[in-house]
Amino acid sequence: MGEVTGGSAEEKVLDGTAWAEFCDALKEAGQLLEAEKAPQDAFNRAEGYRYLTRMLRAGLESFIEYADKDFPVLRCGAHTTIKMGADNPDNRYESASLNPNHDYRITGTRGTVDYLGISTVANRYSQGKSMETTGFMDSRDMEIAGDGTIEIVLSQREHSGNWVPMTEETNQVNVRQTFQDRVNEQQADLQLERIGAAGERPEPFSAEKLVRGLEGTMRFLHNTTGMFENWAESFLPIENQMPHADQAYCQLIGGDPNIHYFHSCWKLEDDEVLVLKAPEIPECQTWNFQLDNWWMESLDYVNHQIHVNKHSAHYEAGGGVVLYISHKDPGHPNWIETAGHNNGTMCWRWIGADVHPDVHASVVKFNEIPQLSNP
């Protein structure tokens, strides 16, 4: 996490400096919402402040509650109320902090979830930089026992069986589970342990841990929020289009190596519809599309249909897909709801595909929607 700055941790806790600096940094974080190209209306500003509270919770969990690399815990850090970086509504995200000088073991059951990927990464989000993959394995390459149990070793040293490499830069493990049908698929149930930790217990909390945790939390909040806001701004020249993203950059900030990404932003008047057409669906493990807000949070997928995937989509007679993004129902099952938003960002993914066909976009008036296919 870096060295404690501005005096010893004990001094900063006893005289209140640690807490005062944390509160000052939190207040300063509000300026992130005043970025020149960010929406300045009350609706988007309110979501922005909520986003900061969510990123604050994410940071506190990462840097204080679950920061012990000797006794790591796989936790779900992005979900319905903590969202970031175009989080996928079809995913369950889990992660834990690692020390590259240790070896770790993941054990549990595979479940029936459509896609399971495990990656070790060098996470530098708190520095406003990147999240580079240092090792990767997905369930297609895993040795899985007949009863569905699995064991995976994370280490710098090569191991037989399921091994995900680490490097001297590795500081985190990420687990992605991607569902096509959450209702009927069973998630993988996994646990993480440090090899050789039997009989040991974590050290008690301390002033050093508190101060480092508060400082790390605020670096994470400032730098990660700023990074994704800048990314959203970069989409403005391609508004209401769906071009291929910079795949190298997507991988640099934590993208799955099996995914080809499309990223952009959208903006619609009350009487407009954004029509997305994918005439060709490649052979792939799955694909999906989702609508996000300006801060690159997925919209409310619990109460609204803001995304679609290979399993849930309605297909055209020729095998392609047409999606209708609009404020009101166009009468087609592939309606993507804007959930009260007039602008935001969006993402399309081809997952596990060898080819990556274009996705075409156009904006039409609601009363000018081309004749819909028979749903």
Image (cartoon, rainbow, N blue to C red):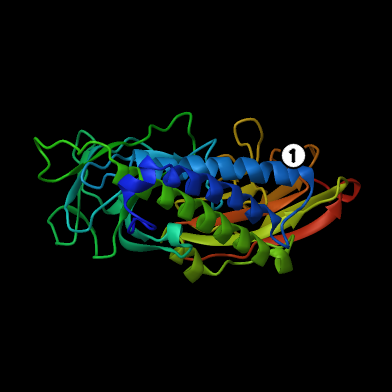
Q: Position of residue 327 (x, y in %)?
A: 79, 41
Q: Give whichever of 168, 272 is nearer the camera.
A: 168
Residue at x 71%, y 57% (from the top left corner): 38
- Total number of numbered discs in the rendering: 1
Nearest the camera: 16 or 324? 16
Name the one closer to the observer, 320 or 318: 320
| Residue 187 visible here | yes
Residue visible at 65% across and 48% down in the picture: 291
Which of the two residues, 225 or 137, is positioned nearer the viewer here?
A: 225
Look at mark 1 in the image and give the residue it sits on.
332
* Res 307 quadrant in image: top right
Give the crowd class for mark 1: few <14, some 14-19, many >=20 residues within 10 Å: some
Residue type for callout 1: His
The picture places residue 149, in percent across and down from the top left corner, at 21, 37
Q: Is residue 306 left or right of residue 223?
A: right
Report whether 298 appears left or right of 207.
right
